[in-house]
């Protein structure tokens, strides 16, 4: 069987992807935290991508395919540590892929890299600039990783490199920022704004990653779910109540709560519930015949409280 290395395998999305592909590939996982009780056919190494010993895994295991998901996506980590893990860790991974004969590489990026801006068109395609750093520097490392991998894609044409930019992901296993936001009983929104948002189920993201690997896809691809709804519909469908607030009040309160450790997002994230960041997923759908298995109703039901 072809040997597959999955970084970030212990996270909720990593586990789903690993289980989806375990029958087709010999799966090896790498993560900074252990996976207790992992399936016996999956080998898991507890390892930091920044460490020198990480290269030993490539030297010893010789994977022909890699799925890269080892990113810090939450905001409680020290910004320097977050940048090192996301950017420096990715650089090390790409160097190993080039050195040890990897044939396929799938990188799970995010649609957030486009940024939420008032001038955003609806349904941005893959050629749209990555503008998240302009107003949301807290996650500029995600755009930097995406750019690094795009450069790698063109530098090494012999490696089938695919960068996936999925929309907001919800589900039982994946702990996303938007999921934590929607699970609040009283959900703060910005008075006068109700942007369209896209969502997809965690199982559909795993399917998209698996299908990318199976087809040997190469390029940059938006991955969209079953549709878009206004923010307040999403709040209602997940069991919360929207609380409109003046923007200055909302940003001030959120920033104070974040600094006190009582809220999971910094105030800059407010733009993502104020302006649209919707994407066009036709390129990926045409290349893979991908269709979401879960409806929006089922996706919202996975986090309903």
Image (tube, rainbow, N blue to C red):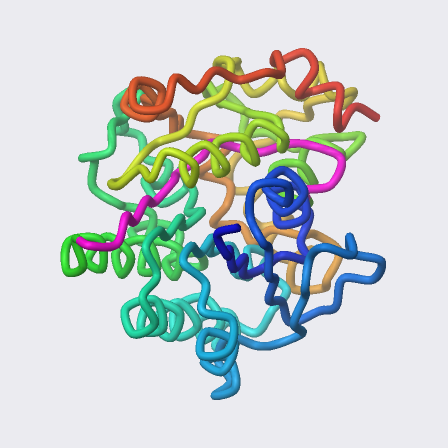
Image height of 138 relative to 47, above or below = above
Residue 160, visible in the rendered structure: yes
Image position of 201 with respect to 253: above or below:
above
Which picture quadrant has residue 223? top left
Say whether residue 193 is visible: no
Residue 269 placement (x, y as % from top left): 50, 45
Residue 98 lies within the magenta run: no
Residue ID at (70%, 52%): 263
Question: Relative to the observer, which residue lies in front, 60 or 199?
Answer: 60
Residue furthest out toward the front: 1
Q: Residue drawn at (35%, 31%), measured in percent from left and top?
A: 222
Number of marks in picture: 0
Report the span colored magenta.
Answer: 158-174
- Give left or right: position of 207 versus 211: right
Residue 298, given in percent of the width and then of the height, sits at: 70, 15
Which quadrant, please, contains the C terminus?
A: top right
Residue 69: give x, y in percent of width and height.
51, 54
Which of 209/137 is in front? 209
Q: Quadrant of residue 90?
A: bottom left
Question: Residue shown at 51%/70% (left/top)?
Answer: 82
Q: Taking 283 as reference, is 233 left or right?
A: right
Judge whether residue 170 is colored magenta.
Answer: yes
Q: Is residue 88 above or below residue 142?
A: below
List the single residue furthest toward the bottom: 52
Q: Residue at x 51, y 85 (%)?
A: 51
Q: Position of residue 204 (x, y in %)?
A: 57, 27
Quadrant assignment, res 220:
top left
């Amino acid at each position: 069987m072809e040997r597959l290395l999955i970084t970030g395998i212990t996270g909720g999305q990593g586990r789903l992807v690993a289980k989806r592909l375990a029958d087709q590939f010999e799966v090896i996982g790498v993560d900074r935290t252990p996976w207790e009780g992992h399936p016996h056919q999956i080998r898991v190494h507890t390892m930091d991508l920044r460490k020198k010993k990480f290269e030993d895994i490539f030297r010893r295991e010789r994977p022909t395919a890699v799925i890269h998901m080892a990113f810090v996506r939450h905001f409680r980590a020290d910004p320097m540590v977050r940048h090192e893990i996301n950017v420096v860790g990715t650089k090390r991974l790409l160097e190993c892929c080039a050195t040890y004969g990897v044939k396929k590489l799938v990188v799970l990026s995010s649609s957030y890299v486009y940024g939420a801006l008032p001038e955003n068109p609806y349904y941005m395609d893959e050629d749209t600039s990555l503008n998240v750093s302009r107003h949301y520097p807290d996650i500029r490392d995600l755009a930097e990783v995406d750019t690094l991998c795009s450069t790698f894609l063109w530098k090494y044409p012999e490696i089938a490199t695919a960068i996936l930019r999925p929309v907001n992901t919800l589900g039982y296993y994946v702990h996303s920022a938007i999921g934590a936001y929607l699970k609040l009983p009283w959900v703060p929104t910005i008075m006068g704004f109700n942007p369209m948002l896209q969502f997809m189920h965690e199982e559909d993201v795993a399917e998209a990653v698996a299908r990318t690997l199976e087809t040997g896809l190469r390029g940059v691809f938006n991955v969209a779910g079953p549709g878009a709804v206004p923010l307040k519909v999403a709040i209602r469908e997940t069991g919360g109540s929207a609380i409109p607030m003046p923007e200055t009040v909302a940003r001030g309160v959120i920033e104070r709560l974040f600094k006190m450790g009582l809220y999971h997002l910094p105030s800059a994230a407010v733009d993502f519930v104020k302006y649209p960041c919707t994407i066009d997923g036709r390129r990926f759908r045409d290349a893979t015949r991908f269709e979401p298995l879960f409806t929006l109703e089922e996706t919202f039901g996975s986090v309903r409280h």
